[in-house]
């Protein structure tokens, strides 16, 4: 690959991920690595991007509700490229339909939204960190939300009084907290870590099936996310949270060192990584 930027987007077959793939392909200087859980939809997305922009993305299939498949995804990416400039952790499960409002568990027995929205990206980031650091300066962009809920460390898997939206909001707070933690652990001249609320109720399948209407356009979310991927002004900027394109603050717990450390230790344990 001779393009100047190599970008991996998870959840790239629908909504924001698919639209971001098209937008980055239109820039003309990006090689795309696209993840999805359905190979037919991955093939269709890659074909559409190629037809529209002349860029042929590489595709990687994995179900992020299974940590073994997350590890296999990382291994496949490492096999496919010796460089990775940007990882966009975009794949996720909403607070309700089409993934249901009842409490469900992942292949590993973890609450589904915490597993897919947070743990999968946490593990994928760690598995690809050596490649990202070797590609310095690299970036990790976590697609989070303004919908946030403090993590209940006495009931992280929400076995009591389950609510899908609460689970979603807790998983997003975990994403942001981890972003801040990794920004403190990894030098910003090697890899930067930032998260964002790309837009409010974009017209994606997840939003339309659960909410029934949209507020912001998909383009609003795409441009906000693309900015964190490509904007040279953000070189060396790490540990920030953005509401669309404006810097914002997440819930206080995301900046609490003790809470972040507890989440980090727990996350390493849950995904089977050694304690640091």
Image (cartoon, rainbow, N blue to C red):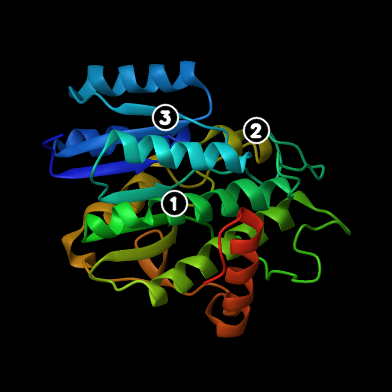
Q: Secondary structure at mark 2?
A: helix
Earlier in the chain: of badge 3 and badge 2, it is: 3
Between the residue at mark 3 and the residue at mark 2, the CA separation in whole angstroms equals: 26 Å
Q: Position of residue 88 (x, y in %)?
A: 39, 48
Q: Name the image quarter holding the N terminus.
A: top left
Identify the residue at horizontal 34%, vertical 53% (top origin): 224
Q: Nearer the viewer, residue 222 or 180?
A: 180
> Which residue position holds label 2?
209
Residue 138 shown left or right of residue 119 in the figure: left
Between the residue at mark 1 and the residue at mark 2, the CA separation in whole angstroms equals: 33 Å
Q: Secondary structure at mark 1?
A: helix
Q: Nearer the viewer, residue 138 or 266?
A: 266
Earlier in the chain: of badge 1 and badge 2, it is: 1
Q: Is residue 228 visible?
A: no
121 shown above or below 249: above
> Which residue position holds label 3?
60
Identify the residue at horizontal 52%, vertical 23% (top origin): 38
Single out the mark in the foreground, 1 or 3.
1
Q: Nearer the viewer, residue 46 or 219?
A: 46
Single out the mark in the foreground, 1 or 2.
1
Label drawn at residue 127: 1
98 shown above or below 141: above
Quarter where residue 239 is shown: bottom left
Q: Going by the picture, which residue comes out furthest to the right?
A: 160
Identify the residue at horizontal 19%, vertical 39% (top origin): 30
Single out the mark in the foreground, 3 or 2.
3
Residue 153 shown left or right of residue 198 in the figure: right
Identify the residue at horizontal 62%, vertical 79% (top origin): 259
Earlier in the chain: of badge 1 and badge 3, it is: 3
Q: Residues within 10 Å of mark 3 (few under 14, many from 20)?
A: many
């Amino acid at each position: 690959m001779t393009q100047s930027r190599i970008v991996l987007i998870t959840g790239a077959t629908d909504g924001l991920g698919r639209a971001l793939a098209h937008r980055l392909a239109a820039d003309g200087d990006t090689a795309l690595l696209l993840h999805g859980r359905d190979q037919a939809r991955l093939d269709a997305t890659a074909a559409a991007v190629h037809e529209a922009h002349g860029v042929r993305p590489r595709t990687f299939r994995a179900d992020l509700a299974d940590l073994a498949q997350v590890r296999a995804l990382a291994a496949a990416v490492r096999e496919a490229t010796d460089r990775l400039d940007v990882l966009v952790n975009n794949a996720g499960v909403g607070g309700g339909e089409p993934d249901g409002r009842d409490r469900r568990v992942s292949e590993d027995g973890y609450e589904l939204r915490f597993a897919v929205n947070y743990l999968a990206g946490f593990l994928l980031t760690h598995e690809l960190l050596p490649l990202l650091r070797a590609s310095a300066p690299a970036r990790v962009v976590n697609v989070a939300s303004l919908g946030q809920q403090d993590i209940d460390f006495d009931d992280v898997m929400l076995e009591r009084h389950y609510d899908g939206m609460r689970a979603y909001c807790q998983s997003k707070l975990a994403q942001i907290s981890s972003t801040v933690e990794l920004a403190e652990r990894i030098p910003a001249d090697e890899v930067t870590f930032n998260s964002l609320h790309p837009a409010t109720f974009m017209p994606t399948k997840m939003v339309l099936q659960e909410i029934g209407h949209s507020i912001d356009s998909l383009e609003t979310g795409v441009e906000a996310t693309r900015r964190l991927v490509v904007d040279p002004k953000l070189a060396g900027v790490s540990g920030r949270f953005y509401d669309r394109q404006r810097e914002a603050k997440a819930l206080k717990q995301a900046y609490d060192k003790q809470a972040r450390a507890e989440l980090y230790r727990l996350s390493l344990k849950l995904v089977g990584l050694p304690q640091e």
